[in-house]
Image (cartoon, grey):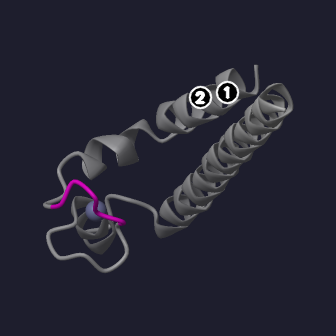
């Protein structure tokens, strides 16, 4: 359920900032963070005034929030897995007795 919402959030960002997404696809590096990278199509667009820097800042902020949400989701999954292992080892220890 929560996963679906997170995916929706990412899709929503991509939808609203379609122009930035299209520019990002033209960056020299696929892992471009559009901050200081050479060959960044987004920075070039800001440079030649075809992209509003305030809009770019908003996009960066949303991307960061989305990344944070996704990271905490992965973290929670990791904890669940560790807990599952703990339960299994406890069950095993009991049956070994
Ligand atoms: Zn870039």
What residue do we see at 38% from left, 59% from top? 51
Indicate whether 18 appears above or below 76. Answer: above
Which residue lies under the disc numbered 2? 7
Indicate whether 83 appears above or below 43. Answer: above
Q: Nearer the viewer, residue 88 or 65?
A: 88
Q: Residues within 10 Å of mark 2 (few under 14, many from 20)?
A: few
Q: Is residue 2 magenta?
A: no
Q: Is residue 41 left or right of residue 56?
A: left
**Where residue 95 sits in the image (x, y, percent)?**
81, 25
Q: Nearer the viewer, residue 91 or 9?
A: 91
Q: Nearer the viewer, residue 28 or 49?
A: 28
* Magenta-tinted stretch: 29-33
**Where residue 31 sits in the image (x, y, percent)?**
28, 58
> Are discs 1 and 2 less than 8 Å apart at CB?
yes
Indicate whether 86 appears above or below 41. Answer: above
Q: Is residue 16 left or right of residue 20?
A: right
On-image quarter of the C terminus: top right
Mark 1: is the Cβ under 8 angstroms from ligand 1?
Answer: no
**Where residue 26 sits in the image (x, y, percent)?**
17, 50
**Residue that extends furthest to the front in the rendered view of this protein:** 97
What residue do we see at 30% from left, 69% from top? 43
Which residue lies under the disc numbered 1? 3
Q: Secondary structure at mark 2?
A: helix
Indicate whether 17 appears above or below 30. Answer: above
């Amino acid at each position: 359920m929560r996963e679906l919402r997170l995916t929706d959030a990412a899709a929503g960002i991509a939808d609203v900032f379609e122009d930035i997404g299209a520019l990002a696809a033209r960056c020299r590096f696929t892992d471009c963070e559009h901050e200081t990278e050479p060959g960044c199509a987004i920075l070039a667009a800001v440079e030649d005034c075809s992209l509003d820097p305030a809009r770019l800042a908003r996009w960066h902020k949303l991307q960061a929030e989305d990344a944070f949400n996704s990271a905490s989701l992965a973290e929670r999954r990791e904890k669940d897995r560790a807990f599952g292992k703990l339960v299994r080892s406890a069950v095993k220890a009991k049956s070994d007795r």
